[in-house]
């Protein structure tokens, strides 16, 4: 970063290319996910559940770095679409367990092509994608 007046130039701000890249990558997902009738936030929830089914709402919130009150309407909608089920935990009534339905499980197979399609669309080599991934997680871990 530069000092003085140059430090306040838009072109010298780290936040701007991160913000723009985030918006544009999310926009690239839109046509891919529309084929499955999913939104990007729904896809993120499904990615968590495809890794491990029957996850507490609070754990999904931590993984996605979202507040549970942000997730609740999203999960209600996903339940209406019959992608997930929300149940109170038998161990702790305050805890909500999110699990996949058969439709949600089946959707995993239908979504397998999305990461590769996105990679092609972004025109990043496997090495570049890995480097970017590592740098972004370094940034995320430092900012937390």
Image (spheres, grey):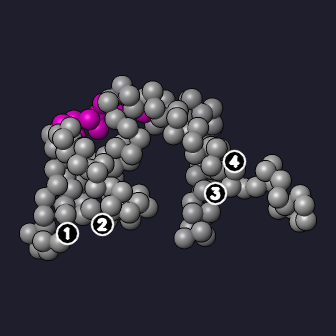
Which residue in the structure is indicated by mark 1? 95
Q: Which of marks 2 and 3 is in front?
A: 2
Q: Earlier in the sequence, mark 4 or mark 1?
A: 4
Estimate the x, y position of residue 51 in percent, counting from the top left. 31, 52
Q: Is residue 126 left or right of residue 47?
A: right
Which residue in the structure is indicated by mark 2? 58
Real-space CA distance between mark 3 and mark 1, rounded to the nearest whole angstrom: 34 Å
Real-space CA distance between mark 4 and mark 1, rounded to the nearest whole angstrom: 38 Å
Q: Where on the picture, by quarter, is residue 127?
A: top right
Mark 1 and mark 2 residues within 8 Å of each other at the beta carbon = yes
Q: Which mark is residue 135?
A: 3
Estimate the x, y position of residue 90 in percent, counting from the top left. 8, 69
Residue 25 position (above or below residue 47) = above
**Does the stretch in magenta take in 31?**
no
Residue at horizontal 21%, vertical 56%? 98
Q: Earlier in the sequence, mark 1 or mark 2?
A: 2
Which residue in the structure is indicated by mark 4? 17
């Amino acid at each position: 970063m530069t000092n003085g007046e140059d430090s306040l130039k838009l072109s010298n701000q780290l936040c701007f290319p991160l913000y723009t890249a985030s918006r544009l990558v999310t926009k690239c997902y839109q046509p891919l996910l529309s084929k499955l009738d999913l939104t990007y936030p729904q896809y993120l929830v499904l990615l968590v559940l495809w890794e491990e089914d029957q996850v507490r709402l609070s754990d999904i919130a931590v993984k996605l770095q979202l507040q549970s009150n942000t997730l609740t309407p999203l999960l209600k909608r996903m339940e209406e679409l019959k992608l997930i089920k929300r149940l109170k935990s038998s161990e702790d009534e305050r805890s909500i367990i999110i699990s996949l339905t058969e439709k949600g499980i089946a959707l995993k197979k239908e979504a397998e092509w999305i990461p590769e399609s996105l990679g092609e669309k972004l025109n990043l080599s496997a090495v570049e994608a890995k480097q970017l991934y590592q740098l972004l997680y370094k940034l995320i871990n430092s900012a937390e």
